[in-house]
Amino acid sequence: MSKIFGFDAYSPKQISERVETVGVAKVHLPLLSMLMLGVLAGGFIGLGGLFFVLIKSDASLGFAVSQFLGGLAFSLGLILVVVAGSELFTGNNLLAMAWADGKISTFDLLKNWVVICCANFIGAAGLALLVFLAGHPEMNNGAIADQYLKIAAAKCSLPFRIAFFRGVLCNILVCMAVWMALAGRSVFDKIAAIVFPISAFVAAGFEHSIANMYFIPMGMLVKTFGNIGTGADAISWAGFFSNIVPVILGNLIGGSVLVGLVYHIIYQRAKPE
């Protein structure tokens, strides 16, 4: 089977081996490099969010069309993460494969997740501040600002259960995008592998913790310093954490368990000694 796939792409079995090898390298990055790469990834995902909101602010588009085109636009974020190189918490949930195979310790796994998640927040929230100061929300006669408020308010109002399960579904698709990108041997291969899974999770309205670290702080900035729209009362730090906690937990289950550990059982656990 590997010979069939290996001609122009890595086979699933080869991908599982690459994921574990990459995982070991990720946890042994110097702390400063880990932090800086995490900040970059948060900013990259924020840029995808910026592109998404630009599409969504066009009221002439129908719901399905705007969701689909917005999803395509948001794909920019993970394309930058994978092709340019950075460390994203949701993608790093695949480190569970290397952990399950005993190649990294529990401490190293948790350290990477915590450091990268915090660095992603700095990058995503920092980009939100830069974009706000650049006057981007004022474009399209303020329609972009209204869209940020609408998105942030909706996210801050999600019940725990819904946020959790949307987080699970989101990171299944995100980690499958990363998984398939690792099958590619060229930049074009990686981009093609990323676009549809990411477009699907965005179009379906699933929850990505790092994207929300851009959307909700931007909503707070627009609410505090811009024109306040209806429903903005839900946007607060309490609303932020009521969204982020279940979404992070859901992302962890979706990426680490339903993708990482499942593929570990399929391809690595039964491998010959």
Image (spheres, rainbow, N blue to C red):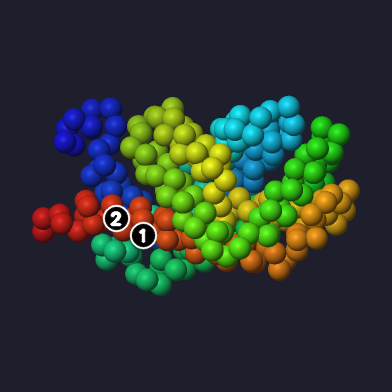
Quadrant housing the N terminus: top left
The residue shown at (54%, 42%) is: 204
Q: Which residue matches tag 1?
A: 257
Secondary structure under badge 2? Answer: helix
Which residue, as the protein is rendered here, is positioned at the far left?
272
Q: Which residue matches tag 2?
A: 262
- The residue lying toward the viewer, choosing from 91 and 253, is 253
Q: Residues within 10 Å of mark 1 (few under 14, many from 20)?
A: some
The residue shown at (23%, 32%) is: 5
Residue kind at label 2, given as amino acid type: Val
73 sits left or right of 126 in the view: left
The residue shown at (52%, 66%) is: 114
Residue kind at label 1, given as amino acid type: Val
Q: Is residue 80 shown to the viewer in this render?
A: no
Asked where in the image residue 181 lies, by quadrant, the reply is top left
Q: Residues within 10 Å of mark 2 (few under 14, many from 20)?
A: some
* Count of numbered circles in the view: 2
Q: CA gap, disc 1 to disc 2?
A: 6 Å
Question: Where is residue 264 drawn, in percent x and y?
Answer: 26, 56
27 sits left or right of 138 in the view: left
| Mark 1 or mark 2: whose residue is earlier in sequence | 1
Asked where in the image residue 138 lies, by quadrant, the reply is top right
- The residue lying toward the viewer, choosing from 87 and 12, is 12
150 sits left or right of 80 in the view: right
